[in-house]
Amino acid sequence: MPPDRSTPQLTRVSLWLTRHGVLLATLAAAALLVFLSTYHLTESPPIWTDEGHLTQVAMNTAVYGLQTQLQVAPGVFESGAFSETSGYPVLFPVAAAFYTFGVHLLSARSVMVIFILLFALCVWQLAKREMPLLLATYALWLIVSFAPLYGNGKNVLGEVPGLFYLTAFLLCLTVIEKGEQSWMHYIGAGLFVGLAVSTKPIFLVALLPVAVVALFSPKMLLPLKTLAALGAFLAATGVWIWVQFGNQTIAHVIDFYANPFAVDTVATISSNAFLFISAPQPFYALVLLVLWTLSIPMRIRKRIPISRAEYTAFGFAVLIYLAFLRITPYYRYYFVGEIFALFYLPLALWHVWPRRIPKVLFHAGIALLIAFQIYQCFFSSWVAGYYRSHRTAEVSQTLGALPISASIFIYNAPELPLFLPAGMPYYQYLFLTPIVIIGKNELPLIAQGVPDFVIVKGDSTSRLDLSSYRIVREFDQYSLWQKKSLQRPATPH
């Protein structure tokens, strides 16, 4: 029988795949990340209320200065300290993009793409230091294929920028723990945790696990370098306090964040807790956290080292889940904790995996989960549901056709001023929570017939006196009304 000449060739292929498999997997994850981050960028996810707050503040920052403000009438501004909960670490880059590339949605969301890419880069660097390379590759793919990363990240919001800053802090912490205790790493750690806290108040809960980990790490607290880290942290948060709350009292700030949605706390806690066992997405988040929680005492018992970065991330995730219980149950409020539970899933599941079950099923299970998440990204998620949307195009076309000399009143649709013709005077009313209302003094202007146009979102027209106006167009979820005294309609039906 002639020798099997294919065997050496198969061996060479196997060795090549072993050496380069991780690189190929990383490049493939990067390609998927870039594609999902940019695909239908201005339409998916759709423009909406919270994004509109930040883009408005960024617009005003680019033109009028650094304070957090929202326009309620031509030349009249009110503080956005409590309506805009994303701070300057995301606001200033968006404002810079507006100033440099023009005031439009693509400029703003391009900044968010950069934050997504930076976050993924930090995830990969942290994963390689926190777990074996194969598990690190799994962790990267789980994050890259997670649809909420794009649902919360492509919108102009603070969650993913905050995650980038916090992950960069964890990366600095890991480097310091491994003995590379340079000034740069200490200052970077303080700066990045300060930027995370300043990006969105929900990241304030990270300070507790950071403080606890620091308390149990006296050998890492080199006096001068720790003071430098503290100085960087105070500088970052000091800018946030000045920009966000410059004209607010401390008592007002504390009173607002004690119950920002003005809800019945006891009833909300029980209702939100039930979501974790009754709704698919919160249940998935809970399973991730439970697996992670089970793995920690198992590793402690087996004397397997657990990094300080993981302890910090775990404490942060637990506090985020608990914080979700007491607020209006938007799923993105636990997303920033869930993302870390997902990141550590391969490591946690590896250690809780029963010995009697072959490890090949572990790898198959992770691969199936990644495949399922990729399917969701393309076909069954919030972002996927808007891949064929034309909301942004319709809004841009309709509002862009309005005469610049006319005035318009925007009722509870903060995402719309971004699309108005440059220089067009506008009024605005925003109802966010029972304790956060912007522009209520301008609301009577509609009944008085002062603005030339009124645009309303949803079914809010029943709350307004529009007797001086006639409807000229309905598009997507908006209706455009024109003053009856004006002869020609603004836009074709």
Image (cartoon, grey):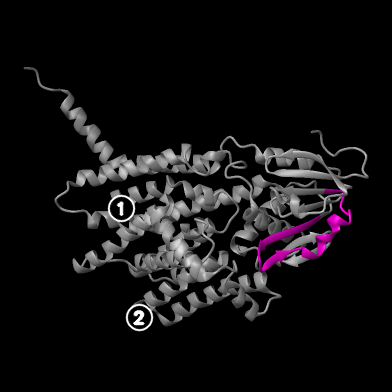
Q: Secondary structure at mark 1?
A: helix
Please, what is the three-letter code of the amino acid marked with disc 2? Answer: Pro
For the residues labelled 2 and 1, the Cα–Cα distance comes to: 30 Å
Please, what is the three-letter code of the amino acid marked with disc 1? Answer: Pro
Q: Where's the N terminus, which quadrant?
A: top left
**Residue sitting at 85 percent across and 56 percent down?**
447
Give the vertical position of 15 relative to 219 (above or below). Answer: above
Q: Nearer the viewer, mark 2 or mark 1?
A: 1
* Residue 317 horizontal/vertical position (percent): 41, 64
- Judging by the rendered image, the residue that carries numbered circle 1 is 346
Query: In the rendered image, which quarter is residue 53 located in?
Result: bottom right
Q: Is residue 436 magenta?
A: yes
Q: Secondary structure at mark 2?
A: helix
Q: Earlier along the polypeptide chain: callout 2 or callout 1?
A: 2
* Residue 471 horizontal/vertical position (percent): 81, 42
Name the residue at the top extreme.
1
Name the residue at the left extreme.
1
- Judging by the rendered image, the residue that carries numbered circle 2 is 218
Please state which of residues 110 and 461 is positioned toward the viewer in this rendering.
461
Give the vertical position of 152 relative to 224 (above or below). Answer: above
Find the magenta span and give its range: 427-453
* Residue 323 horizontal/vertical position (percent): 47, 67
For label 2, the crowd category at 10 Å Cα-Cα, with few meaning under 14, some 14 to 19 and many 20 or more, is few
**Residue sitting at 48 percent across and 43 percent down?**
381
Left/right placement of residue 243 relative to residue 347 reads: right
Can residue 193 be seen from the camera position used here? no
Left/right placement of residue 194 relative to residue 251 reads: left
Query: In the rendered image, which quarter is residue 76 located in?
Result: bottom right
**Residue sitting at 17 percent across and 46 percent down?**
358
